[in-house]
Amino acid sequence: MDLHQILFLLILAGALYLFISERLRVDVTAMVVLLALVVSGVLKPAQALSGFASEPAIIVAAVFVISGGLAATGVTERLGQWIGRAAGRSEARAVAVLMPAVAALSAFTHHVMVTAMMLPITLRHARERDLPASRLLMPMSLAASLGTTLTLVSAPAFLLANDLIERNGGQGLGVFAITPIGIALVVVGMVYMQLTRWLLPRRSGTHGDDDYLRLDRYRTELLVVEGSRWSTRPLAELQKALGDRFRLRGWLRDGKPRDDLRPNSPLLAGDVLLVEASADALMSLHDDPGLDLNAIARFGRRLDGDGEPELVQAVVAPGSEFIGRSIRELDFSRQFEAVIVGLWRRRGEIGERLSDARLRDGDLLVLYGRPSNFSNFAAHHGFLMLVPFAGEAKRRLRAPMALLILGLTILAAATEWLPASLAFLFGAVAMVATRCVDIERAYREIDVRIFVMIAGVIPLGIAMEQTGTAKLLANGLLHVVAHWPPLGVLLVMFSAAALLTQILSDSATTVLLGPIAISLATSLGLPPIPFVVCTALGAVVAFLTPIGHHGNLLILGPGQYRFSDFLRVGLPLTALIAVVSAWMAQWLWLGGPLLPTLG
């Protein structure tokens, strides 16, 4: 063992300690490792920085932006709501609908984002159908993890595995090269969860109560603007554009309620719609030039002060002088130079017109005004807090454009008309250029920690190969598996990754074990692709503990799961997934049989 190998092993030991102990964030740890490799002379500066310009880092950043475009245009939300409606009333049907749909969503977007999006939808579905949330959340999270195996770009581990194969002179994998394995794993996961649902605990979940979900229902009034694009178009088109979280409570024409108007009735300039809308829908309505919040149209021009007008939220305090008084009586535009444009109430009716609502303690007011005047609110004893409005406008009319961009991106990458990195970079730029997502949100969507971590751990893999440490460890493993069949060796690599990924990220696990897999395959005289792919699969889909994947951590609290729940369900499932993964990899790249034979 030479000096560089000793230095590398010391750096690797320090990296493992920092990754496991979490004394530093994973991206900071990756940068510390990168600098240590350069300072120790194990790598040259250009090699250490190569990860930032690597294909995996570029594709991961682009996928985050594309995912943000799909979310900003309401595509992911609408798909999630459709899944909730299609899930039906039985537990078996809910699992049968949730799992393939969530897996398909995870194929081209980040699986943690999919899990986070589907979490409230699944909780709501469980509550409305009187189903235990714990019986649905774990299958949903599992499907999100398995869905990442449907394409090469859906998990950083597969991108790193492909980069490793190409650096060692192999032919890179296509976007759909691992899709047969992914389809098999999704099917196996679905069948397993249907047959072993009795292993899942029966707990209702902690975030399924009505109050948690009702925060999305703000009461407001809309005015159809003269000459707007909505004038003379039916109400149904507006409802379709805004999505399910938009409810019509009343329709005023010429100041009088109209009960005879229906969804196919045309909107006319001057019509006032009494609606309940989510925070995102309310912000979308505020940004729509064809509509105006009625209170702003009536009183907004009177507001004096400095700064661009904006929306904020304030809570009516217990004992406030505003309690029991209607919004009309208070005349906020004169008293505070602000307008109440929306109201959320925890319980009880609000009344037909927003201006007639009598305030109660705990009411949440959405206020429109200039920043220079908000100090009066902040200091007033009648309010508990003053915070920015949390809604984000959905660009639903651009949803077809976002879907078209996603389709073209996948087509360009799959046909190799463009390299995968350029194809997904094109998709990300197109999402911004066509205003499916604004540039500020596009930057916010990129998880910098993951991007930096990937760029930082790639040099770790390069150092492992360059110092000969990978070959050294592979030779030690070779003494054990030299006479094993390829299927057994593939299972060993999957199992090693499945265990290591419980304490490391899937990216770090793939970077550390990937070079060993390549050296082992070379020593056995076999192509390295199946061994590297099985290593990446073990890092991605091992469903053993709640700490193994971020998606599991998201559902841990809402599903009231215990550590043992994941182990009881995940241990046999991971063993089954390991066999299927190794068998399919052997069939795809080693000429093995697709179906097992007897004798």
Image (tube, rainbow, N blue to C red):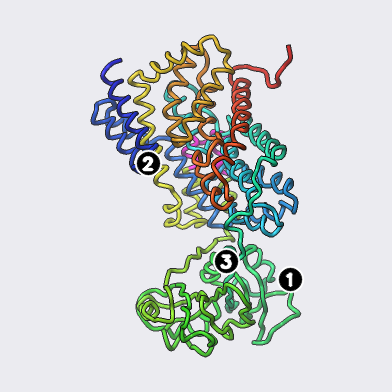
Q: Position of residue 396 (x, y in %)?
A: 58, 60
Instruction: Tell me the element at label 3.
Output: loop
Image height of 414 relative to 276, above or below: above
Q: Position of residue 300 (x, y in %)?
A: 47, 82
Q: Residues within 10 Å of mark 3 (few under 14, many from 20)?
A: some
Residues 67 and 387: in front is 387
Closer mark to the observer between disc 2 and disc 3: 2
Task: Locate the C terminus by quadrant.
Answer: top right
- Name the amino acid, label 3: Asp
Closer mark to the observer between disc 3 and disc 1: 3
384 part of magenta stretch: no
Closer mark to the observer between disc 1 and disc 2: 2
Task: Locate the N terminus by quadrant.
Answer: top left
- Name the amino acid, label 2: Glu
Q: Position of residue 151 (x, y in %)?
A: 57, 36
Q: Gap in Å between the C-alphas at discs 2 and 3? A: 35 Å
Q: Position of residue 196 (x, y in %)?
A: 69, 38
Residues 234 and 561: in front is 561
Q: Mark 2 or mark 3: which comes first in sequence?
A: 2
Residue 22's disc number:
2
Q: Are marks 1 and 2 in contact (CB under 8 Å)?
A: no
Circle 3 is placed at which residue position?
Answer: 216
Q: Mark 1 or mark 2: which comes first in sequence?
A: 2
Circle 1 is placed at which residue position?
Answer: 264
